[in-house]
Amino acid sequence: MTLIKKNFGFGFMRLPMKDGEIDNAEVCRMVDVFLENGFNYFDTAHGYHNGKSEIAIKECLTSRHPRESYVLTNKLSTQHFESNAEIRPLFESQLVACGVDYFDYYLMHAQSAQTFAKYKRCSAYETALEFLKEGKIRHLGISFHDTAEVLEQILTEYPQIEVVQIQFNYADYDDPVVQSRLCYEVCHKFGKPVIVMEPCRGGNLVNMPEEISAVFRDLGGGSNASYAIRFAAGFPGVMMVLSGMGNMDMMLDNISYMKDFKPLSEREQAAVGRVCELFRAKNMIACTACRYCTEGCPANIMIPDLFACLNSKKVFNSWNTDFYYHNVHTVNHGKASDCIKCGNCETICPQRLPIRRLLEDVAAEFEKKNT
């Protein structure tokens, strides 16, 4: 069994491009440098780069380096099967595409309350456990996008899960939308090692406003990415931190501080805290998430969660927030546009927020394509 050498992994989701295609020559160079510096964990999925990520794994890694020199993770993604009968052929095609006989880790991809129901209906976990018995995967895990409550349900129902991949970064640590800290605590409770995705929040913690970047610059060294990745890697139980590196410069920067990893110092932790304060100051809705408003809402709207989505969208403007709005916080609950304007929420709100008007803002942002 190939052992993971270091706690930093190469994610094949954001690869260098040339003329609209993956730049395989550059990826080969990056793979070689990655391995030469003692790292050996690679992560892909069937849908990354419209199906071309797995092919890049074969052309740039598995056909050029011995199998014992790397650890490879792949995933079963919900959009690629509709029945149990389709899972095994899909899995076998992934092995062929990647040019390997087995995956070190195989993750049930993008688990949420909604997708978990489909995985159960299709007996996907049971089929993956068959792959485990057959030696075609060495470890079974999940990647996860939902609330801590849903994560606890999945880990309770399937104790065979060995690792959990979650979105985890300092901006999302106490965020009520992503619930990084709460999900991390569930993993710790169940004794599951954590794989971190989006440590830089899709680049949002790299390309930051000048006044926020200045906080890290005043420390006298280190890129914005370095503080984000080291923050995530410093938590007990974090087995791996993934980074999607779009060019050699990103890789060399990451290697420079992860080759001999050191957790953030107290001074650096304080700077991270200051950056979080500045991000929070940009939020537009002063909701404290007391949740008094949700108890009597006739439309069953999770008002604080939807406000948090809008706050996050205004600060980071990323696709991720739309995902949480449509696939987590409005599943089995009302959307912002379902508000009937009864005003019960405003009567009980300690912050005296104009909730009915603010829900109109939320609907305008997240439901504009559906109206």
Image: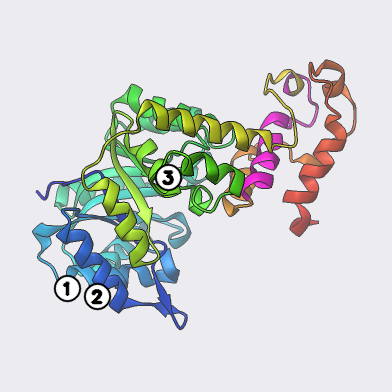
Q: Residue at x 15, y 61 (%)?
A: 36
Q: Which label number is shown at residue 63?
A: 1
Instruction: Specify whether 320 is left or right of 299.
Output: left
Q: Work out whether residue 46 or residue 274 is closer to the camera in this orientation and state it.
A: 274
Q: Work out whether residue 36 or residue 220 is closer to the camera in this orientation and state it.
A: 220
Residue 38 in picture, x, y percent from top left: 15, 53
**Residue located farthest toward the right when viewing the structure as drawn:** 342
Give the quarter of the image for residue 344: top right
Q: Residue at x 15, y 72 (%)?
A: 64
- Looking at marks 3 and 2 on the same chain, the residue that comes earlier in the sequence is marked by 2
**Which amino acid, mark 2?**
Glu
For label 2, the residue is 59
Principal SS element in the magenta part? helix
Q: Work out whether residue 23 or residue 141 is closer to the camera in this orientation and state it.
A: 23
Q: Real-space Cα distance between discs 2 and 1?
A: 6 Å
Q: Is residue 189 above or below residue 39?
A: above
Residue 207 in picture, x, y percent from top left: 53, 54
For the residue labelled by badge 3, is the local secondary structure a helix, a strand or a loop? loop
**Which amino acid, mark 1?**
Ser
| Residue 41 among magenta residues | no
Q: Which label number is shown at residue 199?
A: 3
Give the quarter of the image for residue 89: bottom left
Q: The C terminus lies in which quarter of the figure?
A: bottom right
Q: Real-space Cα distance between discs 3 and 2?
A: 27 Å
Q: Which residues are magenta?
A: 294-316
